[in-house]
Each structure stands twice: as structure tokens, then as C-alpha cells.
Amino acid sequence: MTPIIVPAVLIVGALVFALAAGGVMSAQRAETLDEKCLTRIYGLDRLPIADIVVEVFGPDASVALARAMVAIAHNECGGNSSPPVIGDTNSSGGPSIGPLQVWRQTAIDLGLVPSGESQDTYRQRAYDEMWCLRAGVKVFKDKLHSAGGDIALAIRKYNGSGSAAEAYRDRALSFLASTFGYNWENG
């Protein structure tokens, strides 16, 4: 009787695995990205950046995308990611919130928040760190699309345009090179 039970258990286990494979594969992918991004080293260890990258970009998300998000978070909050992180409070399009400093006007433009959302209401979102991370990765995905897949250009676009955004990109690329090597785009 044991030979019949063991195969049945294996078949049931295989079915359960097959049904859950999408979530399991995504979780495994996020774990792999997290390991390759070294998020634990830079004061960003409590942020599930790799998980959100996989959630937004899909299970084929590259190591380069996750590393770019780590570089953006490092640029934006310098590792000080304890909520609430609120910046650009004096800007008409602000504030910027979360460890990825998502600007209110950008969130409105991308439909992440209602167009009439006030600065005070948006500022309260800074306490919802998961929302802030998802919004930041979605903003980066939009910038990456408009940059034709060029990660360095998308990083610059994440910060806007002009010389300040170019300096922002250069700091991010320098961080990526010093942290992951000059071949940082490859896992």
C-alpha cells in the first residue's frame, strides 16, 4: 500500500506546487534580486524593494532594475528610510514622499492618486511605506518606458531634467559602479 500512497502524495504536492508556482516563482525571483542587490547593506534592509520590483515589472524583472531602484532610494533618502520620509514641502507640485520620494504631481500625472488630492492628504500617504514603494517603482517603470529601456536615462528622468537631474543620474551611476562594479547591469 505504501507504493500507492507515496505517488498520490507526490501528485497532490505537484498539483499544489503547480497552482502556486506563479507566486512561488515571483517570491524566489524577488529573493534572488534582493541577494544580488545587497539591500541589507545600505540601511534599506527593511524595505522590500526587490519584492516590489518583481510585483510591478513581473517575474522576469532584471537585477539591473532592482539595483537601479536601490540606487534611487540611496539618492533620495541616503539610507534614512524611517517613515515618514517627506520632502519638497514648499513646492506647489509637492510634497515628495517615501524612501523613493514620489512627487505628488508625478503621482497625479500617472493616475496613482486622484487629480484633486490635496498636499495634506498626499503627505499622509508617507506613513504607508508599501504604497510609497509601489508608487516609486511604478514611476520608474514609466520613466524606463519613456527612455526606451535605457536605465541610466530613466534614472535621470526619475529626477526630472536639466543639470540637477544629470548630477542625480551621475550620483546613482557612481553608487551602482562602486557598489556592484562597472558591470552592475548584469547579475
Image (cartoon, helix red, strand yellow):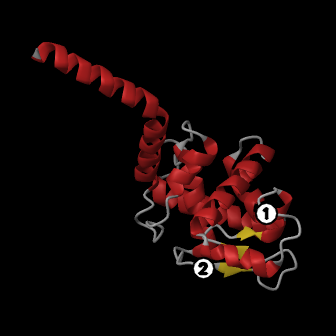
Three-letter amino acid code of the residue under disc 2: Pro
* Res. 95 in view: no
Q: Residue at x 54, y 57 (%)?
A: 176
Instruction: Depth check: give the residue in front, 1 or 179.
Output: 1
The first of marks 1 and 2 along the sequence is 2
Three-letter amino acid code of the residue under disc 1: Val
- Residue 58 point in image, percent of width and height: 59, 40
Q: Residue at x 44, y 52 (%)?
A: 34
Residue 114 vs residue 169: left or right?
A: right
Secondary structure under badge 1? loop
Instruction: Depth check: give the residue in front, 78 or 152.
Output: 78
**Residue linked to disc 2:** 84
- Residue 130 point in image, percent of width and height: 58, 63
- Residue 151 point in image, percent of width and height: 67, 48
Secondary structure under badge 2? loop
Instruction: Depth check: give the residue in front, 187 or 14.
Output: 14
Residue 118 vs residue 159: left or right?
A: right
Say few, some or many: other residues with alpha carbon within 10 Å of mark 1 (under 14 / 14 to 19 / 20 or more).
some
* Res. 6 in view: yes
Instruction: Name the image quarter holding residue 8.
Output: top left
Task: Name, please, the residue furthest toward the bottom.
Answer: 90
Real-space CA distance between mark 1 and mark 2, rounded to the nearest whole angstrom: 18 Å
